[in-house]
Image: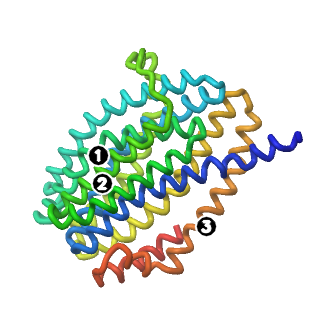
Amino acid sequence: MHDLPVISQRTAPLRVGAPLALARLAQTLAGTIAVAVAGHVGWRELCAVGLGASIFFTVAAFGAGVLLGIEPIASRAAGRGDVDGVRRALGQGLLLAAGLALVLGLALFAVSTGVRHAGVAPEPADDLKLYLWGRLPGLTPYLAFVVLRSAAAAENRTRSVLAAALAANLCVLATAPPLASVLGVLGVGLAESAGAVVQTLVLASLVPRPRFAGSLSLEALMPLLRVGVPVGLALVAEYAVFAGLGLVVAVIEPDALGAHQVAMTWVGTLFMLPVGFGSGVAAQIGRALGRGDAAGARRVAGLSSGLALALGTLLAAPFVLVPGNLAAWVTVDASALAGASSLMSLAAAV
C-alpha cells in the first residue's frame, strides 16, 4: 500500500505531461493546417503564411513568456490546496495578458507595415502584411489561453487544455479553406484568429473563475514578472532566430522560401510535444515544492529528463524516414517538396 504514492509520483510526469504535450501539438497543428491550406492555394500564399506565422509568434513570444510566470505561482498555490491563490494568479495573468496584447498588437502592426524595408519584394511583403492583419484579432485570446493553460496545468486539468486545442483545430479546419478562397492569406489569418478565440472560450469554461481583486497592484504582479520577463526575452530570442532566417531566405533566395517554410512548419509542429511535456513537468515540480516536498521535485525532474531524451529521439524519426510524405501534406509545389525533404533530413540530426 505504501508503494502506491511512489508509483503515482513516478508516473505523474507522464500522466500530466502527456495531455499537455498533445495539447501543444494540437494547438500547433492549427497553424500547420493553415499553412497546408495556403500551400495548396499557391506558392506565394505558402510563403506568406509560413513566414508570417514565424513573425507573429516572435512578437507574441514575449507576452507568452511573461505569462508563463503564472505557472510556478499557480502550481505552488495548488500544491498548498490554496484554490483562492490559483484564482488570484489567474486574475493577475489575464489582466496582464490584456495589457501585453495592446502593446504587442501595436508592435505586430508596425512589423506588418515595415516588412518592405527589410528588403522583401513588394508582392510577398503585401501578402505577409495581409496575413499578419488577419492574425491581429487572435493575439489577445492567444495570450489569455497561455494564462488559462497554466492554471489548468497547476490543477492537473490538462485534458481540458487538450479539449480546447482540439476545438481550435476543428475551427481552423472548417473556416480556413472557405475564407482562403475568398480573402486569400487574410482569410487564413482570420481563420487562425477564430481558432484562438474558440480554444480560449472552451478552456475558460473548464478552469476556476479568476479573481481580479487586487490583481493590478505592482506588489501582486512582481513575483509573476520576476519569473516571466526573463522567460519572455529568451523566447523572443529563440523565435527571432527562425523568423530572421526566414526573412534572410526571402531576401537572398526567394525561390527557396517555400521549401524552408514547409520544413520549418513540421519542425515547429513536432517540437511542441517536448515543450508541452516540459510544461507538465514544471507544474508537477511546482506542486511538489508547494507542499514542501523537495525530494519529490528532484525525483520528477530526474525521471522527466530520461523521458524527454526518449521523446526527442522518437520525434527525429519521421524526418529521416518519411520527409517527403510530411512535405506533401503541406504543399504540392515540386520545388518546395524537393527542398523541404532535404532540409527535414538535416533537421533530424540537430
User: Is residue 134 shown to the viewer in this render?
Assistant: yes
Instruction: Name the residue tied to disc 2.
Output: 192
Note whether 171 is above or below 335 in the view shown. above
Badge 2 crowding class, 10 Å Cα cut-off, few under 14, some 14 to 19, many 20 or more, is: many
Q: Residue at 26% x, 57% y: name it.
A: 52
Q: Name the kind of residue labelled 2 in the image.
A: Glu
Q: Residue at 27% x, 39% y: name it.
A: 104
Instruction: Name the residue tied to disc 3.
Output: 313
Q: Earlier in the sequence, mark 1 or mark 3?
A: 1
Circles 2 and 1 in contact, beta carbons < 8 Å: yes
Q: Position of residue 55 (x, y in %)?
A: 29, 53
SS for callout 2: helix
Q: Position of residue 70 (x, y in %)?
A: 49, 32
Q: Position of residue 120 (x, y in %)?
A: 17, 62
Displayed quadrant of residue 262: bottom left
Q: Position of residue 138 (x, y in %)?
A: 29, 46
Note whether 2 is above or below 55 in the view shown. above
Badge 3 crowding class, 10 Å Cα cut-off, few under 14, some 14 to 19, many 20 or more, is: few
Note whether 59 is above or below 341 in the view shown. above
Q: Earlier in the sequence, mark 3 or mark 2?
A: 2
Q: Name the kind of residue labelled 1 in the image.
A: Gly
Q: Label 1 to label 3, Cα distance in Å?
A: 33 Å
Q: Name the kind of residue labelled 3 in the image.
A: Thr
Instruction: Name the residue tied to disc 1.
Output: 138
Displayed quadrant of residue 211: top left
Badge 1 crowding class, 10 Å Cα cut-off, few under 14, some 14 to 19, many 20 or more, is: many
